[in-house]
Image (spheres, rainbow, N blue to C red):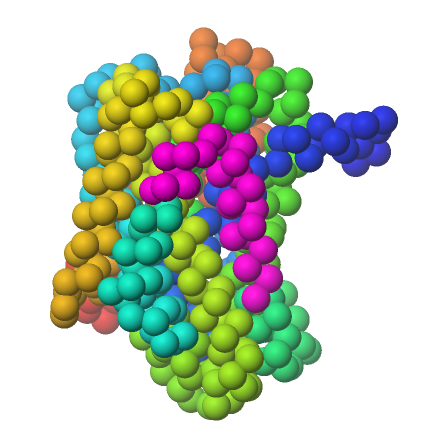
């Protein structure tokens, strides 16, 4: 730490902050908050232990993406196309496009649900949010958007506060975090897989690497970006930790079952007061808005990279038409579908989980093959010890993700 932060280096660190923090926090989107809320409400503190290995895996995977972006100056989609050809890249991109489109719909559903808690019709808040997102993207450059993302990130503090307002048994919290009681039941395993799957997703890797390239981080600045990735991964897990704690301390102890994050917010009011409910609902809105912002942006980035089109919010509309048109289509169509009465959003969200689950192994293996290619990475390729850790973590994540897909498609598979 002393070697990194000497004579003004702290200001260099501040200048590179953004890609890691934004990517990690945006991963706690409406779907993530729903998963963590259900984990806490249905199983108490018993899944808190899982956040430790998840955080370690997230650090390693995100660090590899950041390193590839800085060393090559190219996004992950670019590198996949160059390494494995257009045909494989095309099928990966189509899968990611559908998965992220369904995920964007779930973000707008989260905006609608949180708005209704505050008495706002979804037919007002969803179109307004979509219009604001596209307007900000169209009129801003990367630095301006980073400021917007930093402001949205502040609202995640509401979940930390909600955790404290819930007055948990901190002794039990510590015990279940570091000396857990793991339940080998079907329901527990399915939600545990969901917690892992919602924390490490394909879109994160593409967005992180593209945003590092867009920000123009140089090789000599990489040690600061690496530190940011580590801190950001810990922060996103801290938010997840407090969401589980808040739900476990209130809903689980009162045997209240929920189906989504909005249910959790509504259920909190009679247990810990309207202020705690408002904090939870405000956090849900900010997270869903953040996700509806980032995920279409990430999608447009890597689709354009893969096809060799110009992309980036630093470019004007006339210079990157495909990028902006793709953004507009994803945002506007996802918004319109959410506004259809009685649309089966849960089924669409499940579909996005399945597609992401199928794609994640392909993305992780592609990353590992690229980062170990000396022609691409030179002396910055993975070391042997690093590879052992990352391959082991990746294999575990892949197996659990495939199990998630299997249990989603065939609910009775675990007995």
The image position of residue 396, as x and y in percent, is: 41, 47
- Please give left or right for residue 206 compared with residue 58 in the image: left
Seen at 61% across and 79% down, the residue is 165
The image position of residue 141, as x and y in percent, is: 47, 30
> Residue 319 occupies which quadrant of the picture?
top left
Question: Quick check: is 12 in the magenta stretch?
Answer: no
Magenta segment boundaries in residue numbering? 134-158
- Please give left or right for residue 268 compared with residue 128 in the image: right
- For this rendering, which residue is in front, 207 or 273? 273
In this orientation, does residue 388 appear? Answer: no
Q: Quadrant of the N terminus?
A: top right
- Please give left or right for residue 383 compared with residue 315 in the image: right
Q: Quadrant of the C terminus?
A: bottom left
In this orientation, does residue 376 appear? Answer: yes
Seen at 52% across and 52% down, the residue is 152
Task: Tell me the chief SS of the magenta region.
Answer: helix
Above or below 222: residue 136:
below
- For this rendering, which residue is in front, 161 or 99? 161
Seen at 52% across and 61% down, the residue is 240
Seen as rendered, the residue at the extreme top is: 375
- Please give left or right for residue 259 compared with residue 249 in the image: left
- For this rendering, which residue is in front, 272 or 225? 272
Question: Quick check: is 137 in the magenta stretch?
Answer: yes
Above or below 10: residue 32:
below
Above or below 155: residue 226:
above
């Amino acid at each position: 730490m002393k070697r990194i932060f000497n004579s003004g280096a702290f200001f260099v660190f501040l200048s590179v902050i953004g890609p890691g923090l934004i990517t990690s926090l945006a991963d706690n989107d409406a779907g993530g908050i729903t998963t963590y809320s259900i984990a806490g409400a249905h199983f108490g503190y018993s899944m808190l232990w899982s956040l430790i290995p998840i955080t370690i895996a997230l650090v390693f995977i995100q660090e590899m993406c950041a390193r590839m972006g800085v060393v090559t100056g190219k996004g992950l989609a670019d590198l996949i196309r160059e390494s494995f050809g257009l045909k494989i890249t095309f099928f990966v991109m189509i899968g990611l496009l559908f998965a992220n489109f369904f995920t964007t719909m779930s973000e707008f559903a989260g905006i609608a649900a949180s708005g209704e808690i505050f008495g706002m019709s979804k037919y007002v808040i969803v179109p307004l949010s979509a219009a604001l997102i596209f307007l900000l993207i169209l009129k801003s450059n990367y630095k301006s958007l980073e400021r917007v993302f930093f402001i949205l990130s502040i609202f995640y503090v509401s979940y930390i506060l909600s955790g404290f307002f819930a007055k948990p048994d901190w002794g039990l919290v510590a015990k279940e975090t570091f000396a857990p009681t793991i339940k080998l039941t079907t329901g527990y395993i399915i939600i545990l897989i969901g917690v892992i799957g919602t924390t490490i997703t394909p879109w994160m890797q593409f967005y992180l690497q593209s945003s590092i390239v867009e920000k123009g981080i140089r090789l000599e600045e990489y040690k600061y970006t690496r530190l940011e990735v580590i801190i950001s991964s810990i922060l996103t897990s801290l938010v997840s930790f407090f969401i589980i704690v808040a739900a476990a301390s209130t809903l689980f102890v009162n045997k209240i079952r929920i189906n989504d994050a909005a249910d959790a917010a509504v259920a909190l009011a009679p247990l810990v007061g309207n202020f705690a409910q408002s904090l939870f609902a405000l956090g849900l809105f900010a997270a869903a808005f953040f996700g509806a912002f980032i995920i279409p942006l990430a999608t447009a980035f890597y689709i354009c990279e893969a096809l060799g089109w110009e992309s980036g919010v630093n470019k004007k509309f006339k210079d990157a038409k495909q990028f902006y048109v793709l953004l507009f289509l994803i945002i506007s169509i996802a918004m319109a579908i959410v506004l259809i009465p009685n649309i089966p959003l849960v089924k669409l969200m499940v579909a996005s989980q399945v597609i992401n689950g199928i794609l994640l192994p392909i993305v992780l293996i592609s990353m590992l093959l690229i980062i170990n290619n000396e022609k691409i990475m030179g002396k910055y390729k993975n070391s042997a010890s690093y590879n052992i850790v990352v391959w082991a973590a990746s294999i575990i994540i892949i197996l659990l993700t495939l199990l998630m897909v299997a249990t989603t498609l065939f609910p009775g598979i675990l007995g």
